[in-house]
Image: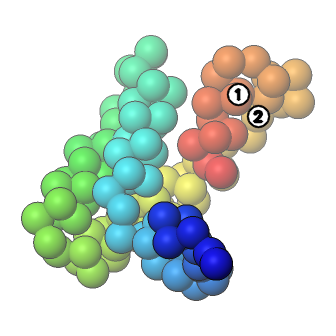
């Protein structure tokens, strides 16, 4: 006899996990927060154009426009990654607070 109160948790595949992650409003919000933390002091105005667009993507996701939101966040995240990869960082600066924030933003 098995206990009916025990639920078996089904394993989800990698594709299902990626799909649920893509439909979540959390990744663009976290990216916008990290970009803002990295570029507010001293203010760098070009990178600060990204957080409002990513927050708009989160709003669209919460308003049931998941596909549009995914496209906007993928495009703007990719554009930020391309621009951030152009700035070279010396090895010693990679392990400070700013370097860790930059690495997590690009990761």
Residue that extends furthest to the right in the rendered view of this protein:
91
Q: Which label is found at residue 89?
A: 2
Furthest toward the left, the residue is: 63
Q: Residue at coordinates 40% horizontally, 21% vertically from top-left?
A: 40
On the image, the x and y values in percent for residue 73 come to 36, 64
Judge the density around disc 1: few (<14), some (14-19), many (≥20) Cα neighbours within 10 Å: some
Q: Label 2, label 1: how many angstroms apart (C-alpha)?
A: 8 Å
Residue pictured at 64% horizontal, 22% vertical: 98
Q: Which circle marks residue 99 in the picture? A: 1
Q: Rate crowding at label 2 as few (under 14), some (14 to 19) or many (20 or more) other CA atoms within 10 Å.
A: few
Where does the image place residue 53, in percent across and percent down from the top left? 25, 53
Which quadrant holds residue 60? Answer: bottom left
SS of the residue under disc 1: helix
Residue shown at 74% from the left, 40% from the top: 88
- Mark yes or no: residue 17 visible: yes
Q: Decide: marks 2, 1 in contact (CB < 8 A)?
A: yes
Q: Reply above or below: 31 against 6.
A: above
Which structural element holds mark 2?
loop
- From the viewer's perspective, is residue 73 above or below residue 104? below
User: Which of 51/29 is in front?
Assistant: 29
In the rendered image, is residue 46 in sight? Answer: no
């Amino acid at each position: 006899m098995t206990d009916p109160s025990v639920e078996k948790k089904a394993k989800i595949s990698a594709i299902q996990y990626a799909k649920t992650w893509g439909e979540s409003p959390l990744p663009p919000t976290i990216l916008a927060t990290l970009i803002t933390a990295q570029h507010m002091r001293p203010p760098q105005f070009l990178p600060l154009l990204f957080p409002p667009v990513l927050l708009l993507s989160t709003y669209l996701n919460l308003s049931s426009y998941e596909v549009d939101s995914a496209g906007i966040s993928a495009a703007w995240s990719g554009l930020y990654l391309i621009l951030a990869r152009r700035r070279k960082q010396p090895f010693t600066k990679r392990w400070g607070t700013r370097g860790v924030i930059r690495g997590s933003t690009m990761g």
